[in-house]
Amino acid sequence: MQGKEMGNSVKDPHTSAPWRVGVLFSRTGFMSVIEETQLRGTLIAIDEINENGGINGRPIEPVIYDPGSDVRSYGQYAKRLMVEDGIRTIFGCYTSASRKAVLPVVERLDGLLWYPTLYEGFEFSPNVIYSGATPNQNSVQLCKMLMEQFGTRFYFVGSDYIYPRESNRVMRELVRNSGGTIVGERYLRLEADRTEFIPVLRDIKRAQPDVIFSTVVGESTTFLYQAYHDIGLNPKSLPIASLTTTEAEIRAMGYDVGEGHYTAASYFQGVETEGNSRFVARYRGRYGDDEPTNTCLEASYFQVNLFARTLEQTNSLDTKLLRSSVMGAEFDAPQGCVSINPLWGHADVWTRIGRANRRGQFDIVFQSPSSVSADPYLVGYGRCLENC
Ligand code: ACM
């Protein structure tokens, strides 16, 4: 196959052929509220790199598919990218369910999935680079703050799939081992509409928790917060706390509806770094002044940059080469300096807690002094809040 690219491992050192990469985010369906922004973060990074001459003189060319928020489609498109399009590196997925659908494909065909979303931890694959936060980088600090400021009675509400159930397993352990209780736990289907949240909110009123911990994702997030707002609860005494309610979901639900609720994330639009001011200005310039950035978008952006730096060294999209070379790589991201933890293949990212304000932004109420080492199996934690 002389002269033809096989998985982009072109041997000709003088070629100017593009580096082809796969991109899998949903632009349609109930996950598009957040995944569209992840697609944008990916494409902004690719465009910036290409405007600066590409990697070793070759542009990055994204091959983009829209899985339409259908979990199985992520696996099918991943296979298509690898088998039909000859691609090895894929940027994509928001839900852990979609990541789990892509996992067997990249493992069997030796691809590399760059996954830019916070998740429940307790996973390791040599075929995945995890760029989002794990529970030691968000849940632990969030739980501590909530118990100190609001109380010990937690109510869990989540979408019904692996991330909410596993994330709640960790949160339950943290709450219980620190003297708290879970007074209610409800899961709704991923596509749940507004009416389905009304009985949940009634049950919350009956159970009288101090905090609602939400692991609801996608469009349903809007319905949870709107139902909360409609029923007349007050975030000053009973806030919703979450890891998945970003500026994008707040914009979709209405700023007044989101105001007063808490989110733990590595990045908020209001982070004060020079790099972030430039990043936000560039994003607004491209998508409009009322389009906010968010933590999932930012992770999508920085992981492409980490990939690009690594590719500059390897000059090859070979999965093993890329993976071994990205370990320990650093990037001055909008959130601050991030790196890929060589022990885990997960990113060392910052921990922040924000409280949503009337402008749809988060006032940052907690920030780690530096990035926090990834610990996806919580080996460094006694599963309680005393020593964090
Ligand atoms: C998620 O499903 N990892 C938010």
Image (cartoon, rainbow, N blue to C red):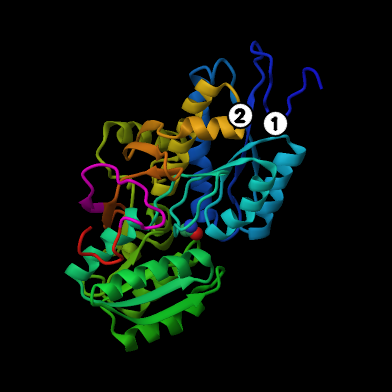
Q: Nearer the viewer, residue 303 or 135?
A: 135
- Residue contact between numbered discs 1 and 2, judged by CB atoms under 8 Å: yes
Instruction: Write the residue at 53% across / 73% down.
Output: 193
Q: Which residue is mark 2?
A: 317
Residue farthest to the right, as pictured:
1
Span of residues in magenta: 363-380
Instruction: Write the residue at 39% across / 48% down.
Output: 295
Q: Would you say 310 lies left or right of 139 here?
A: right
Instruction: State whether residue 45 appears in this view.
Output: no
Q: Main secondary structure of the magenta part?
A: loop
Q: Quadrant of the C terminus?
A: bottom left
Q: Which residue is mark 1?
A: 7
Residue 326 position within the rendered picture, expressed as x and y whole percent measured from the top left:
47, 32
Tell me the kind of residue under disc 2.
Leu
Q: Nearer the viewer, residue 352 or 357?
A: 352
Does the magenta run of residues contain 188? no
